[in-house]
Image: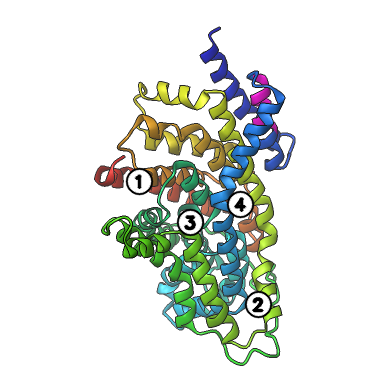
Amino acid sequence: MGTDLQHLLLGAAAVVVLILLITKTKLHPFLALSISALGLGLAAGIGPGQTVENFQNGFGDALKSTGPTIGLGTILGGILLGSGGADRIATAFIGARPVKWIPTAITAAALLIGMPHLFDVSFVMLVPLVYAVAKRTGTHLLYVGLPMAAGLYISHGLLPPHPSPTLAVSAYGASTGLTILYGLIIGIPIAVVSGPLLTKVASRWFGPAPDLDKGPVPEPEPLPDNQRRPASFALALITVLLPPVLMLIGTVGTSNTAEGSLPHALFEACDSSVLSLLAAVVFAFFALGVRSGFGLGQLQKMAGKGLGPVGGIVLILGAGGGLKAMLTATGIDQLISDYAVDWSVPPLLLAWLVAALLRICLGSATVATAAATGIVAPLLGAYPGLSPELMVLASASGAVMLSHVNDSGFWLFKEYFQLSVSQTFRTWTLMLSLQSLLSLGGVLLLGTFVGG
């Protein structure tokens, strides 16, 4: 057996081991990724010392760009949530609008609120509002809940600073600003289709209406004694939009100014996801926190509240970088690149397929993206005109395909909305599969204009 074929088989075996460790032994994804990556290096004969060093280097490379972005995004979301800014946005969008406009309004609100938040945090935060609106309007809970989840998942699946797209941006060396721009171009129409339009079509499959008085809705936290006034809707909206707007301005500005000039340096600062998010955090600290009467201790608690769940995600991202580094160290990434040039599958479609297959097997969009980018990233070198931003969106959209019983989001949606497993398949799984397929179509279409 040739060395090349042997290494390819070892790479395939590492992915299979990864899937089995997560699905069969229920091992934490961080440990599963670490074992698979280190096992690949040892099996390929790199040697223990070099294997560990490659894994550590890959771990660090993955986190040096993704860690600060995700951390700042989480802190921003915590302040927006704790100050009441997110609730102000949701309430302003929904208001007293006619029932027929509720799905559209809550999709738009969820898309905005979800931009700086982790999905689980945003979802749990908006569930009480969903119950309240459904009770007030006398509608089925899913008439409000399904479009809410659709709006949140567009942000979660396609837009940095969420973990999957942020990891893919780092892996492919893409521009964060352009990724957000392309993600919004693709995501907004898909939010309309998978939110209000799908809700209208799928309403016949909703099944029995849940009891609105028995939902697992958390009690709202009491306002602090020193909060003098509610959060401003305008300031909350500015807080959410500030990072993407700054990055888009930076992306456009850097391409239209001379390198080395002061304007170029300013635009380059705006184009940095870290600096843009930091500016938004500082703005939120004063505009939503201090202005509303929160003390420094309370703001610190808000900022830190969402960082707990991020710990596991950061470890997964780092271990995914370690696996990617091991594929490079063993030469597997170059072999994939060399063989892929002769394949008839377009690279954008291949990126989506690999991520979708891993997502279906593993259940986690973050783990699927981490593994998929390690396999597919070498294709960028084989296709010089390929847009790295579209590769980000192809991989990230594939990683939301066909959510089912091995995905924690599936059970979150089922339990909070009191659904049966079959109801959850007919709503949640259908919605995410539609988003994934439409996102692929959008990426391929956009690729005809910007390279792909």
Calculate the distance from the C-alpha at mark 1 to the C-alpha at mark 2: 39 Å
User: Can you identify the residue that label 4 sits on?
Assistant: 410
- Residue 216 in percent (x, y) is at 69, 67
- Precedes in sequence: disc 4 or disc 1: 4
Residue type indicated by callout 3: Pro
Pair 2/4: label in front: 2
- Precedes in sequence: disc 1 or disc 2: 2
Q: Secondary structure at mark 1?
A: helix
User: Can you identify the residue that label 1 sits on?
Assistant: 443
- Precedes in sequence: disc 3 or disc 1: 3
Calculate the distance from the C-alpha at mark 4 to the C-alpha at mark 3: 22 Å
What residue span does the magenta drawing correspond to?
A: 35-43
Pair 4/1: label in front: 1
Side of 256 relative to 66 (left or right): left
- Precedes in sequence: disc 2 or disc 4: 2
Check contact, mark 4 vs mark 1: CB within 8 A.
no
Q: Secondary structure at mark 2?
A: helix
Side of 62 relative to 448 (left or right): right
- Give the crowd class for mark 2: few <14, some 14-19, many >=20 residues within 10 Å: many
User: Can you identify the residue that label 3 sits on?
Assistant: 160
User: Can you identify the residue that label 2 sits on?
Assistant: 299
